[in-house]
């Protein structure tokens, strides 16, 4: 059984704790729960997992993995419990953070049953168009969480590099993929899997069809009020993997894609998960992106120790780079 130190911060108050001790806090895995700070730009709690053995007084890389509850519910406590499990017990991100001795940040974004088409955990188009403070620009809210976490970690003796790692599986993998096109300058490297075989493409059209967000970047500038930075995006080291038996297909459901989006994807990228994955690989490779693709033949919509080890090795190799 794992034992955790758990702190709940409603404001920046780490200094007293850090000064009070010689950091026994890091003699076991630790969890920091930071409550929402609307005045700082984030309307939801977030979690920092600090594994035992994290280096102090040296610069390291923060790992970010968006939360994915796997179901809709208006109970934020259920989403919070799922995010805590992801951060501290069971996720690719937790495995990576534990083995690499780097902190992991997990947001506690809701996925409301009262608004079932708002697929927050995948950062879909409905989310990007939503203007209510709670859901508006979750990508920017996540960036504010990361900035806030950097300040808190410094007070504990953990210096964070300007760019961060991102990891995600299933809906959170889709979130990371879309986020990486929005904010490529922020990301040092990313690893995603189990994302329905559908990647957001860094192109404006395909077969004469305009590809709007989240299929492509045709309306990127209008939607995000900035231009897509292809030069930076193509340089992000990416490890993208799928199980060869994975048939989990969010594309065919209304909460993930609209009827028109589904039609475009099915007709131009493929009607099955595996067909789309092959086609998306081809388009990414044609664009000259820094991506390694991997199919795990006897695996469905789940992760394995082999997958975890390969993702850990991928991030380890990136950690060694200056």
Image (cartoon, helix red, strand yellow):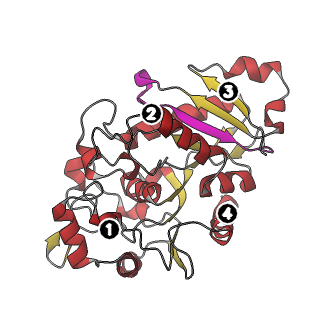
> Which image quadrant for residue 289?
bottom left
Q: Which mark is residue 312?
A: 4
**In this view, the mark in front (3 or 2):** 2
Disc 4 to disc 3: CB gap under 8 Å? no
Query: In terms of sequence position, does the residue under pointer 2 or pointer 4 come before the other?
Result: 2
Q: Which mark is residue 76?
A: 2
CA distance for labels 3 and 2: 19 Å
CA distance for labels 1 and 3: 40 Å
SS of the residue at dot 2? helix
Disc 1 target residue? 201
**In this view, the mark in front (2 or 1):** 2
SS of the residue at dot 1? loop
SS of the residue at dot 3? strand
CA distance for labels 1 and 4: 26 Å
Give the image location of residue 142, x and y in percent. Answer: 45, 40
Q: Which residues are magenta?
A: 37-53
Query: In terms of sequence position, does the residue under pointer 1 or pointer 3 come before the other?
Result: 3
Give the image location of residue 274, x and y in percent. Answer: 40, 79
């Amino acid at each position: 059984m794992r034992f955790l130190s758990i702190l709940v911060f409603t404001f920046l108050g780490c200094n007293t704790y850090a000064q009070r001790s010689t950091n026994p806090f890091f003699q076991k895995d630790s969890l920091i729960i930071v409550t929402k700070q609307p005045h700082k730009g984030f309307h939801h709690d977030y979690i920092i997992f600090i594994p035992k053995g994290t280096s102090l007084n040296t610069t390291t890389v923060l790992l970010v993995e968006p939360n994915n509850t796997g179901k809709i519910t208006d109970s934020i406590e259920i989403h919070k419990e799922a995010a805590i499990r992801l951060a501290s017990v069971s996720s690719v991100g937790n495995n990576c953070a534990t083995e690499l001795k780097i902190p992991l940040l997990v947001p506690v974004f809701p996925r409301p049953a009262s608004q079932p088409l708002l697929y927050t955990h995948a950062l879909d188009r409905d989310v990007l168009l939503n203007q209510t403070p709670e859901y508006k620009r979750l990508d920017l809210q996540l960036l504010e969480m990361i900035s806030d976490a950097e300040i808190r970690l410094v007070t504990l003796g953990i210096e964070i590099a300007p760019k961060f790692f991102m990891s995600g599986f299933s809906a959170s993998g889709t979130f990371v993929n879309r986020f990486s096109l929005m904010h490529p300058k922020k990301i040092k490297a990313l690893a995603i899997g189990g994302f329905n075989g559908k990647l957001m493409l860094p192109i404006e059209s395909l077969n004469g069809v305009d590809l709007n967000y989240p299929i492509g970047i045709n309306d990127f500038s209008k939607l995000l009020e900035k231009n897509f930075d292809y030069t930076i995006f193509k340089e992000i080291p990416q490890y993208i993997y799928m199980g060869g038996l994975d048939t989990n297909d969010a594309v065919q459901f209304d909460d993930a894609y609209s009827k028109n989006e589904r039609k475009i994807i099915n007709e131009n990228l493929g009607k099955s998960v595996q067909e789309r994955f092959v086609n998306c690989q081809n388009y990414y490779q044609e664009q000259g992106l820094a991506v390694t693709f991997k199919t795990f033949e006897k695996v469905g919509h789940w992760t394995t120790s082999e997958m975890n080890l390969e993702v850990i090795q991928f991030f380890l190799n990136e950690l060694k780079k200056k």
